[in-house]
């Protein structure tokens, strides 16, 4: 065990762990976002997708375990780095001005903490159903877990939607620095590609955040409709 | 020009410091920032007060001795300029200026605005060198080096070791300095024999000295008086990882 966590003593190895686990989490976020947008394809497609994921069985738990491990490493390493970094400057500047650092890069720890709290709530809401037991164990006409309606009922609550949208904006702040930063940490910095990496990273962050936000917004604005309304032919 | 100066005063490494406020008059816009401090010190000496200690040597922007944070920015507001080459015409009459030392655990304050930067020397001693033949002087062009490689090496070798990168970093990280030193050798054939050992040794020493870790804010690049690129940090990360994965210490006596 001691040898496994010895990387924490090295600044660069710690940074590499932050970047590598970050890459895993961005890949997960991209897949999760694409999955969510199936809410626009209707109840049948969405519930079929959810059932397909659940039917993976052991594979699903392996994937979940891998993502969970990445999250744990990401958090543990970041706390350790923060301690090292705080120790490195025992006396603060009386006046500090920033020349180049962005609001995104300077708030990584705080956006990270907020995202962590949000993810805990999010799992209790949509994975475990502990926050909403009355509207969680629903089944559709085909006898499948009616994820479509669970999501829809959740987002019809303006307060819950607001929390999701706010959390996704914070995620956007985090990703705006994180993605291009991971390239730099992993040693990818080249005059020919750095511009493309920075623009591409900003675009990927924007697409992920907009994709996630589009679902609660879609429900609130009426683009994603309850099944009863759809069945009645209401548009 | 009249200025209000808020300056960090600290008697020694062991004592706590605090800001002190001074008024200076008759500052010429043509003075350098250090000449302005000289004027303040003459004033303090006339009043039988302790003058402000600050580091300086060449006052030409090439030695790396001067080290002042002005209004929260190492080397002050002008890009790619050491504080000794910054002139008072860049400020306005009546300005209030905050003058502080480099702030890092690895750079303890010696007195007032003077910090001990020998941690950089120890990092260099750990691996910032190449092996060279003794004996006769080698032919200058015996080893051919492409113009691109020579230029890149020179860009990194422009580092004067002033420590502004550490001072600007919110984590007091020395990665721009170490990245520059590793990169200047990595681009040259002479730097290859010790390349892996150098990356491991210099990074280990950097961590041991108590510098923080980089979070890619790139403040270091923005304040560097020599405009060293953070691409050097990426190169250091690559070299360090490659060495970590592949370097094996050879036993002595391989004849």
Image (cartoon, helix red, strand yellow):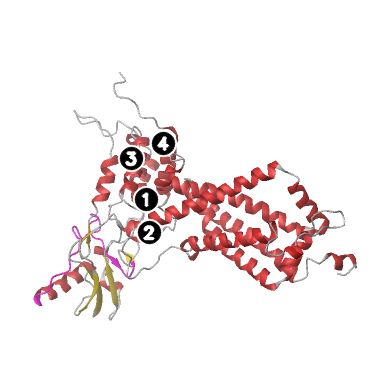
Tell which tag, 1 or 2, sits nearer the viewer.
2
Q: Position of residue B162 (x, y in %)?
A: 27, 55
Label annotation for residue B116: none
Residue underneath mark 2: A86
First in residue order: circle 3 vs circle 4: 3
Q: Secondary structure at mark 4?
A: helix
CB contact under 8 Å: marks 2 and 4: no
Calculate the distance from the C-alpha at mark 3 to the C-alpha at mark 2.
24 Å
Dot 4, crowdedness within 10 Å: few (<14), some or many (≥20)?
A: some
First in residue order: circle 1 vs circle 4: 1
Tell which tag, 2 or 4, sits nearer the viewer.
2
Residue underneath mark 1: B175
Dot 2, crowdedness within 10 Å: few (<14), some or many (≥20)?
A: many
Q: Position of residue B228 (x, y in %)?
A: 36, 53
Residue underneath mark 3: B201
Task: Return the chain for callout 3.
Answer: B
- The reply to whether residue A191 is in sight is no
Q: Is residue A1 left or right of residue A202?
A: left
Q: Secondary structure at mark 3?
A: helix
Task: Return the chain for callout 4.
Answer: B
Q: Which residues are magenta?
A: B46-72
Calculate the distance from the C-alpha at mark 1 to the C-alpha at mark 4.
17 Å
Q: Secondary structure at mark 2?
A: helix
Residue underneath mark 4: B243
Q: Nearer the viewer, residue B224 or B116?
A: B116
Calculate the distance from the C-alpha at mark 1 to the C-alpha at mark 3.
14 Å
């Amino acid at each position: 065990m001691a040898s496994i966590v010895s990387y924490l003593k090295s600044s660069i190895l710690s940074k590499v762990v932050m970047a590598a686990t970050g890459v895993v989490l961005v890949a997960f976020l991209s897949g999760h976002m694409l999955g969510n947008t199936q809410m626009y394809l209707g109840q049948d497609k969405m519930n079929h997708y959810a059932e397909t994921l659940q039917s993976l069985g052991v594979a699903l738990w392996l994937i979940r375990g891998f993502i969970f491990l990445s999250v744990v490493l990401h958090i543990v390493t970041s706390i350790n780095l923060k301690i090292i970094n705080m120790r490195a400057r025992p006396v603060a500047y009386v006046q500090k001005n920033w020349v180049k650092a962005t609001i995104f890069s300077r708030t990584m720890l705080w956006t990270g903490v907020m995202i962590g709290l949000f993810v805990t709530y999010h799992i209790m809401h949509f994975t475990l159903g502990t926050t909403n037991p009355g509207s969680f164990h629903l089944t559709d006409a085909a006898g499948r877990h009616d994820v479509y309606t669970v999501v829809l009922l959740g987002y019809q609550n303006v307060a819950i939607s607001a929390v999701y949208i706010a959390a996704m904006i914070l995620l956007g702040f985090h990703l705006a620095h994180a993605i291009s930063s991971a390239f730099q940490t992993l040693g990818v910095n080249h005059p020919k590609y750095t511009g493309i990496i920075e623009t591409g990273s900003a675009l990927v962050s924007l697409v992920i955040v907009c994709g996630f936000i589009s679902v609660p917004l879609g429900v609130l604005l009426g683009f994603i409709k309850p099944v009863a309304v759809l069945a009645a032919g209401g548009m | 020009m009249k200025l209000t100066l808020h300056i960090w005063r600290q008697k020694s490494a062991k004592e706590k410091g605090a800001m002190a406020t001074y008024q200076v008059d008759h500052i010429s816009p043509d003075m350098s920032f250090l000449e302005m401090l000289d004027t303040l010190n003459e004033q303090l000496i006339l009043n039988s007060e302790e003058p402000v200690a600050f580091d300086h040597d060449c006052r030409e922007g090439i030695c790396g001795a001067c080290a002042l944070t002005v209004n929260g920015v190492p080397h002050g507001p002008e890009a790619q300029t050491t504080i000794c080459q910054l002139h008072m015409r860049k400020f306005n009459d009546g300005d209030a200026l905050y003058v502080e030392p480099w702030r890092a655990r690895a750079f303890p304050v010696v007195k007032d605005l003077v910090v001990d930067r020998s941690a950089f020397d120890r990092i260099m001693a750990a691996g910032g060198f190449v092996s060279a033949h003794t004996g006769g002087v080698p032919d200058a062009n015996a080893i051919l080096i492409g113009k691109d490689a020579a230029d890149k090496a020179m860009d990194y070798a422009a580092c004067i070791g002033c420590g502004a990168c550490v001072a600007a970093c919110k984590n007091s990280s020395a990665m721009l300095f170490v990245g520059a030193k590793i990169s200047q050798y990595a681009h040259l054939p002479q730097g290859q024999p010790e390349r892996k050992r150098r990356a491991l040794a210099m990074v280990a020493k950097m961590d041991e000295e108590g510098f923080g870790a980089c979070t890619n804010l790139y403040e270091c690049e923005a304040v560097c008086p020599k405009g060293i690129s953070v691409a050097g940090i990426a190169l250091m990360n690559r070299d360090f990882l490659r060495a970590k994965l592949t370097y094996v210490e050879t036993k002595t006596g391989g004849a």
